[in-house]
Image: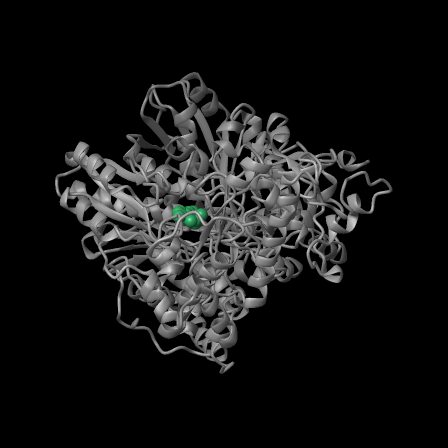
C-alpha cells in the first residue's frame, strides 16, 4: 500500500482485508465479483476520463490556486446575503467538527439528542423572532421557503382563486423560484407594486417582503387585514436580524413567516448552504413541510426530543406529502441557533442596532451630499437615486473594494451588516462623490413599527455567553450524539462514507466562504472554474452531456429533472404528456417531486423478486401511452439489486414517447462500472452528500446536481436573477446553489481519479456482499440479483423473526445502540426490515464488529423466542439502556446489568451511552411541543 495515495485512505479494507472478504463472498477478485453482479447490458468497460489522482497535499495546493482566483470584496449587495462574523468557537466546534458534520438525520432520536436540542433552539429562535407559533427545523434557502409558503397557502386557503400576489419589492431570486414552482401547479403569480396598486379582488395568498428588497420598511398591517378579508393567507418574508428591532409578522396576524438565517453567523459561500426558515401561526403546524423537532418523553417518562409529525412527510405520504423536502440544512441551522445562543437577545439587538446605525449614517451622508434615497424608513439597506449614474457609482465602489447593488440605470442599493466599518462607509460616500459625513444620526425606524415584545427569554439564550460556557455547551450536546466519528452508520440508501478532512479543509477559507452569490463575474473566476470542472467530471462519471449543480438537495434535483422533461415535451407540442410512472419501491421524494412538476403519479408494481414488474409496466404503459411523460426508477433499485430488466424498461418507455429518469441516489454502486446516461436514461439527479462525500451534517447540507442528455440541456436550471418565467426553471435562490461546499466533491474526485473511484465502487459492493454472506444464516437477505449477489446494500428481513418472537425491527435497531452502533435504515423500502449499506470506507474490523453485534442480537432474539426472557421484559424490548438505568439502585429485570450495558464484547472503556431511553413518539405528536420546554420539565 502506498499511503500517499488518497484512495488507500478513503477505502477502508486493506489488501489483506479485501482478500478475506472476497474469500467469504466466494470470488477471486473484485473484477470477477463485479462481472458477476452487474448485468452485462449496462456494464461499461471503459476508463473514466478524469485527471490522474492528486495527493492530499497537491489538492490543497490546487484549491489554494483556485481560491486565489476569487477576489473577495466587501459585500454591500444585500438581497438576502450579508456579511457576518462567524464566532470562532462556533466555526471550529460546529462547522469544522466531525461530531456535528458527520452526523446523520436524527431518525434514531435516542442517539441524536444533541442535535435535536440545537434544532429545538433553532425553532425557538425563529418562533420568538417572527412572533409565530411554530417553526420547522430549517428549509433549503429563502427562495424555496417562500415557494413552500405559497403551496402551504394553496393547501389551506378557502379562496378558490388561482392568484398568488407577490409584493414587487420582493427579492428577485425569490420571485424566480416562486414563479417556477407556481407554473406547473396552475398558480397564477401576480407581481404587484403595493405602494401604487390595489390588491386584486380575489387571490388565495399574498407574499410580502419585510423589509423590502429596496430596504424600505412598510407597515403591512392593513394589507394583512385586506388579504384575510379575501380569504387569503399572508406570508411575510422577514429578515430575522431586523426583527430584533422591528414589530414581527406574528404581531400583525401573518399566517406564515419565511426567510433565511444566513446572517446569523453563516458565511455567504457564493449562495449557500444556509438554513432557510418557515414558521406558521397556530392552527397550521400540522401542514408545515420539512422536519419538525418536538418534545416527547422516554420510557422512564423523562422529556426527550424527536422528530414530530413525520406522518405528513414525503417518505410516508408520497404523492400526498406536503412537500418533497428530505435533506434540509441542519448543520447551518445548528450554527445559526448557536449564534443566537452565544449572543443572546441583548447581543442580537446590539448587532442589529449597530447595523441600523451604519445604514442611517450612510443615508444621512448621501442626503447631506445631495443624493436622494427611496423611502424614509429602513433597517439596513438604502436605495440611492442617482439618475443615469448608477453603473458608474457601482464601478467606482468596486474599484474601492466594495460591491454595491446595481438596481437599474438610476438606482443603487447599499446594505450594511455587522461587518460594516467606517472605512466601508467612507468608500461608499466617495463612490457617490459625496463628502465624508460626521454629523449625528437618529434611528429611522417608525415608532409604530418598533418591536416592544421580548424574545429569546428561555435560559438557553442567556447561559452560554462566555466562550468557556459556549465551548462546553457544544461539547455536551455533541457528546450525546452518535456520528461517523464514533463508528459506522450502516444506512441503506444514504451512503454514510468517509468525509475526509482534506475534502473539508477549504470550505472555511475566506475566498470560498465570503463570496456573495451576486458578486460581479470578474471577482468569481475561481468559483466558476471549480463549478465548471466539477460539472464536467460529473458528466463524465454519469455519461450524461450536461450537469447543473444548482439544486441544493436530491429532492430539488428530482424537481429540476422532471421540469426539464416537462419543458421538453411542451416544446415538442406534447404538453399533454403528464403521467409519471413510479415503481412501488421508490423513495417518497420521487412521487412528491412528480406532483410538484405537475405530473400525475401512476404506480408500477414490483414482482416477488423486488424488481420492477415488467408485465405491470407494459400494462401501465399501454393504459397511458398517449399521456406518458416519464418513468422514475432508482438504479440499482432501492432494494439494493442490479435489476437485469433496466435496459428493456428504458426501451419500452422510450417507445411510448416517455423519458427515463434514473434516481442517482445509489450511484455509489455504479461509478466506474456503468453510466446511466449511456445505458438508456435521459436524466438523473445525484446526491453529492451520498456518493461524493459531502457530510450529512445531521440532515443537510446536500447538493443534488441534475444531469441530462443533450436534448434536455436547454431545460436545465437558469439564472435566479434572469427574471425569466417560462424559460429555464429556477430551482434555488443562487445560480450554483450550495456552492460553498462544492470544494468537497471536487477534492474527492480530484484525489480518487478514475482508478480510485472504480475501486471504491467495487469495494462498496464487496462490503455489502460480505455483510450479506456473514449474516444470511442469521437473517434472510430479502432480495438479490445475478448469482445471489446484492449491489451496494442489502435488506435483512426481520419479519419471520418478528412473527415468531414478537421482537420488532425497532427493538433490534435500539439494541444496536447498546452495542455501540447506529441502526441501519429501518422499514424502508420494505416495512419490518433493516437495510444495510456498509460503504467502501469501513475497514474489515468495523464490518466484523457490526456482523458480530447482529449475530449476538440474533442469539438474544432466540432466547426471547425460547421463552428464556419474557417478551415484554428483555434486553431488546428495553433497549437502549442508559447509564442511569443500569446504575440505578433497583434492578428488577430478568437479565443482568452487564448484559444490558456491555453485551457481546462491547469495550467497557469506550462505551457509548445514550442519554435517554426509548422515546415514545406518539405521545409527543398528541401533545405537540416544538419550542424549548421550561427547564423545570427536566427536573426529577
Ligand atoms: C436520499 C434519496 C433521495 C432524496 O435526496 P435528498 O438529498 O435527501 O433530498 C431520493 N431518492 C433516493 C433513492 C434517496 O436515497
Q: Residue at x 69, y 51 (%)?
A: 480
Quadrant housing residue 680: bottom left
User: On the picture, is 316 further left or further right than 842?
Assistant: left
The mark tally for this picture is 0
> Between residues 712 and 78, which one lies in front from this camera angle?
712
Q: Position of residue 906 (x, y in %)?
A: 70, 58
Q: Where is residue 877 drawn, in percent x and y?
A: 66, 39
Residue 384: in sight, yes or no? no
Q: Say which quadrant the C terminus sits in.
A: top right
**x, y percent for residue 598:** 28, 35
Q: What colour scheme was applied to this rendering of the protein?
A: one colour
Residue drawn 85% across the image and 40% down it: 890
Can residue 657 be seen here? The reply is: yes
Residue at the (59%, 37%) spot, across then down: 805
When the figure is inspected, residue 682 is found, relative to residue 580, above or below; the finding is below
**Horizontal and vertical percent for residue 732?**
38, 48
Q: Name the residue located 42 percent from the left edge and 66 percent from the top edge.
A: 26
Q: Is residue 837 above or below residue 940?
A: below
Q: Is residue 254 shown left or right of residue 122?
A: left
Amino acid at each position: 500500500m502506498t499511503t500517499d495515495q488518497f484512495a488507500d485512505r478513503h477505502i477502508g479494507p486493506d489488501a489483506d482485508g479485501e482478500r478475506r472478504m472476497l474469500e467469504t463472498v466466494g470470488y477471486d477478485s473484485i473484477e470477477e465479483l463485479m462481472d458477476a453482479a452487474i448485468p452485462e447490458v449496462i456494464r461499461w468497460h471503459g476508463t473514466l476520463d478524469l485527471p490522474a489522482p492528486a495527493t492530499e497535499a497537491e489538492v490543497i495546493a490546487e484549491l489554494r490556486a483556485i481560491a486565489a482566483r476569487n477576489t473577495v470584496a466587501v459585500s454591500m449587495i444585500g438581497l438576502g446575503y450579508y456579511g457576518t462574523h462567524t464566532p470562532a468557537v462556533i466555526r471550529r466546534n460546529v462547522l469544522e467538527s466531525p461530531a456535528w458534520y458527520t452526523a446523520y438525520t436524527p431518525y434514531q432520536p435516542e442517539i441524536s439528542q444533541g442535535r435535536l436540542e440545537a434544532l429545538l433552539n433553532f425553532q425557538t429562535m425563529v418562533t420568538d423572532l417572527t412572533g409565530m407559533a411554530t417553526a420547522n427545523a430549517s428549509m433549503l434557502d429563502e427562495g424555496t421557503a417562500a415557494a413552500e409558503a405559497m403551496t402551504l397557502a394553496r393547501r389551506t386557503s378557502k379562496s378558490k382563486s388561482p392568484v398568488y400576489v407577490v409584493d414587487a419589492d420582493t427579492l428577485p431570486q425569490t420571485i424566480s423560484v416562486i414563479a417556477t414552482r407556481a407554473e406547473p401547479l396552475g398558480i397564477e403569480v401576480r407581481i404587484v407594486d403595493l405602494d401604487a396598486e390595489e390588491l386584486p379582488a380575489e387571490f388565495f395568498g399574498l407574499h410580502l417582503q419585510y423589509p423590502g428588497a429596496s430596504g424600505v420598511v412598510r407597515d403591512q398591517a392593513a394589507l394583512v387585514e385586506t388579504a384575510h378579508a379575501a380569504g387569503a393567507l399572508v406570508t411575510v418574508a422577514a429578515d430575522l436580524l431586523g426583527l430584533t428591532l422591528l414589530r414581527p409578522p406574528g404581531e400583525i396576524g401573518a399566517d406564515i413567516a419565511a426567510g433565511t438565517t444566513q446572517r446569523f453567523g453563516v458565511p455567504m459561500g457564493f449562495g449557500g448552504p444556509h438554513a432557510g426558515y418557515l414558521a406558521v401561526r397556530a392552527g397550521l403546524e400540522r401542514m408545515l413541510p420539512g422536519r419538525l423537532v418536538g418534545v416527547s418523553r422516554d420510557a422512564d417518562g423523562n422529556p426527550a426530543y424527536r422528530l414530530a409529525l413525520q406522518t405528513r412527510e414525503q417518505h410516508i405520504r408520497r404523492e400526498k406529502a406536503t412537500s418533497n423536502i428530505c435533506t434540509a440544512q441542519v448543520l447551518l441551522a445548528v450554527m445559526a441557533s448557536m449564534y443566537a445562543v452565544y449572543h443572546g437577545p441583548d447581543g442580537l439587538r446590539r448587532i442589529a442596532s449597530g447595523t441600523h446605525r451604519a445604514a442611517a449614517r450612510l443615508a444621512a451622508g448621501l442626503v447631506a451630499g445631495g443624493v436622494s434615497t427611496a423611502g424614509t424608513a429602513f433597517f439596513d439597506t438604502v436605495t440611492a437615486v442617482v439618475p443615469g449614474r448608477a453603473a458608474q457609482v457601482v464601478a467606482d465602489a468596486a474599484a474601492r473594494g466594495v460591491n454595491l447593488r446595481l438596481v437599474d440605470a438610476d438606482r443603487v442599493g447599499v446594505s450594511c451588516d455587522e461587518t460594516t466599518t467606517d472605512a466601508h462607509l467612507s468608500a461608499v460616500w466617495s463612490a457617490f462623490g459625496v463628502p465624508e459625513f460626521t454629523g449625528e444620526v437618529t434611528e429611522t425606524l417608525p415608532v409604530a413599527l418598533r418591536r416592544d415584545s421580548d424574545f429569546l427569554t428561555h435560559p438557553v439564550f442567556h447561559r452560554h455567553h462566555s466562550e468557556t460556557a459556549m465551548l462546553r455547551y457544544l461539547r455536551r450536546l455533541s457528546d450525546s450524539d452518535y456520528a461517523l466519528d464514533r463508528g459506522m452508520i450502516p444506512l441503506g440508501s444514504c451512503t454514510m462514507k468517509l468525509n475526509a478532512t482534506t475534502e473539508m479543509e477549504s470550505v472555511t477559507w475566506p475566498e470560498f466562504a465570503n463570496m456573495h452569490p451576486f458578486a460581479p463575474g470578474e471577482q468569481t473566476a475561481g468559483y466558476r472554474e471549480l463549478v465548471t470542472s466539477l460539472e464536467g467530471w460529473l458528466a463524465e462519471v454519469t455519461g450524461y452531456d450536461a450537469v447543473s449543480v444548482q439544486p441544493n438537495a436530491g429532492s430539488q434535483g428530482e424537481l429540476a429533472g422532471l421540469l426539464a422533461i416537462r419543458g421538453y415535451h411542451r416544446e415538442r407540442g406534447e404538453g399533454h404528456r403528464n403521467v409519471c410512472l413510479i415503481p412501488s419501491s421508490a423513495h417518497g421524494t420521487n412521487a412528491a417531486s412528480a406532483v410538484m412538476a405537475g405530473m400525475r403519479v401512476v404506480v408500477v408494481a414490483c414482482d416477488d423478486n423486488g424488481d420492477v414488474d415488467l408485465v405491470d409496466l407494459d400494462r401501465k404503459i399501454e393504459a397511458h401511452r398517449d399521456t406518458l411523460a416519464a418513468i422514475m426508477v432508482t438504479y440499482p433499485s432501492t432494494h439494493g439489486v442490479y435489476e437485469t430488466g433496466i435496459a428493456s424498461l428504458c426501451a419500452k418507455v422510450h417507445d411510448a414517447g416517455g423519458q427515463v429518469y434514473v434516481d442517482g441516489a445509489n450511484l455509489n454502486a455504479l461509478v466506474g462500472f456503468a453510466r446511466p446516461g449511456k445505458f438508456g436514461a435521459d436524466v438523473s439527479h445525484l446526491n453529492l452528500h451520498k456518493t461524493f462525500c459531502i457530510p450529512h451534517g445531521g440532515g443537510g447540507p446536500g447538493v443534488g446536481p441534475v444531469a441530462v442528455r443533450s436534448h434536455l440541456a436547454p431545460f436545465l436550471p437558469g439564472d435566479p436573477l434572469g427574471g425569466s418565467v417560462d424559460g429555464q426553471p429556477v430551482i434555488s435562490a443562487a445560480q450554483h446553489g450550495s456552492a460553498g461546499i462544492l470544494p468537497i466533491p471536487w477534492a474527492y474526485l480530484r484525489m480518487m481519479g478514475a482508478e480510485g473511484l472504480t475501486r471504491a465502487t467495487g469495494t462498496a459492493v464487496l462490503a455489502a456482499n460480505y455483510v450479506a454472506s456473514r449474516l444470511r444464516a442469521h437473517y434472510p437477505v430479502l432480495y438479490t440479483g445475478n448469482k445471489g449477489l446484492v449491489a451496494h446494500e442489502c435488506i435483512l428481513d426481520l419479519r419471520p423473526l418478528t412473527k415468531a418472537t414478537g421482537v420488532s425491527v425497532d427493538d433490534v435497531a435500539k439494541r444496536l445502540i447498546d452495542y455501540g452502533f447506529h441502526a441501519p435504515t429501518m422499514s424502508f423500502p420494505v416495512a419490518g426490515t433493516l437495510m444495510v449499506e456498509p460503504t467502501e470506507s469501513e475497514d474489515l474490523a468495523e464490518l466484523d464488529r457490526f456482523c458480530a453485534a447482529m449475530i449476538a442480537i440474533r442469539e438474544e432474539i432466540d432466547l426471547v423466542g425460547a421463552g428464556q426472557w419474557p417478551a415484554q421484559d428483555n434486553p431488546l424490548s428495553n433497549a437502549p439502556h442508559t447509564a442511569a438505568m443500569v446504575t440505578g439502585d433497583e434492578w428488577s429485570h430478568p437479565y443482568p446489568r452487564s448484559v444490558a450495558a456491555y453485551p457481546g464484547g462491547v469495550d467497557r472503556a469506550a462505551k457509548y451511552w445514550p442519554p435517554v431511553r426509548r422515546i415514545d413518539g406518539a405521545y409527543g405528536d398528541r401533545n405537540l411541543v416544538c419550542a424549548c420546554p421550561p427547564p423545570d420539565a427536566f427536573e426529577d
